[in-house]
Structures are given as C-alpha cells and as structure tokens.
Amino acid sequence: MITLNVNGVDHELDIDPSMPLLYALRNHLQLNAAKYGCGVGQCGACTVMLDKEAVFSCLVPVSAVGKRAVRTVEGLGTAENPGPLQQAFIEEQAAQCGYCIAGMIMRAQALLDRRPDASEEEIREHMQPNLCRCGTQTRILAAIVQASKSMTASAQGGGK
C-alpha cells in the first residue's frame, strides 16, 4: 500500500511502488491535467510539484515520493475560482492546444512560490525544461510575468 498526499488529501493506493507518479495521478486518482508526453523527462507535460520543487512525474516512482506533498494544477484553483497563475494564463490566452499548459503552470508555480517577484530573465531560465510545440511561449511568458506582478502587488498589500 502506498500513501500519497495529493493536493492536501491523503490517498491510500494498492499499486506497484515502481509505478511512475504520473500513472498514479492519472489512472488511480483521475487527476488528468498532467500529461504523458515523452516518458523520459524531456518535455515537461507531466510536471507537478513535489513539496515546492517542480518534477517530471513520469520519472518519479511513487515509492520515492514518501511523505512529500504532491501538488497538481487541479490543486491550484477551479474553473469557477482559478488561482492567480491560472487566471493569468486565461487572460493572456496562453494555451493553444493545451497539452503542455498544466506542466507549464506547475513549473511556473514552483518558481513564483519561491520568488513571486521573479524577473523575466529568471522566468525564462526556470521554464526552459518545459516545451510547447504550438509556439505560445510568448503568451506563456506574458502570463507568468503578469502573475508575478499580481502576486508581488498582493504580497505588498496592493492587490490587483
């Protein structure tokens, strides 16, 4: 039996300890935002947060998760009440096909949780492991910059 804390909820799963976290999320918990892209950690479509770190869930066996918290895009907000980063992606129309977006959002969230005032240069560098084949990188960057400004203003008491 493997216990995973996903989006603040403990789940006991009777699964093979070597199963990639991605498969546990998608096939056993029905959290389908993280996508299977390459299976070798080169595209980022499967990116989730493990504690505060962005990881490729296709490479992490569930046995390696231990007591660390898993956070997926489903844990950031809802369609009715999106989180600040999700809202910025909506406003900037950052998704074209949408396949990479959950991974992009989770990688960006990991950065903004640590550095809400991240510079555009820091954002570009941090986002490099995640690929978008549709060419919406400019909108994705704009969304992350917008969220960074919004989060910094909120932290300073200015709100949006």
Image (cartoon, rainbow, N blue to C red):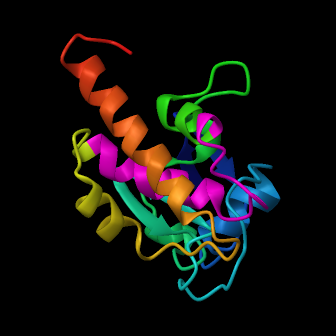
Q: Nearer the viewer, residue 68 or 145?
A: 145
Q: Is residue 47 above or below residue 31?
A: below
Name which residue lies at 68% across and 74% down. Answer: 16
Residue 89 place in picture, x, y as percent:
58, 42
Residue 131 place in picture, x, y as percent:
56, 75
**For this view, does 30 lie left or right of residue 155?**
right
Q: Is residue 147 above or below residue 144?
A: above
Spot the residue most to the left: 156
Q: Nearer the viewer, residue 29 or 34?
A: 34
Q: Which residues are magenta?
A: 90-113
Is residue 78 visible in the rendered structure shown here? yes
Prevalent SS, magenta region: helix
Q: Is residue 53 magenta?
A: no
Residue 142 place in picture, x, y as percent:
46, 49
Quadrant of the rendered structure where residue 22 is? Answer: bottom right
Quadrant of the rendered structure where residue 151 is? Answer: top left
Name which residue lies at 49% across and 37% down. Answer: 85
Name which residue lies at 69% across and 53% down. Answer: 95
Q: In the picture, which quadrant includes the C terminus?
A: top left
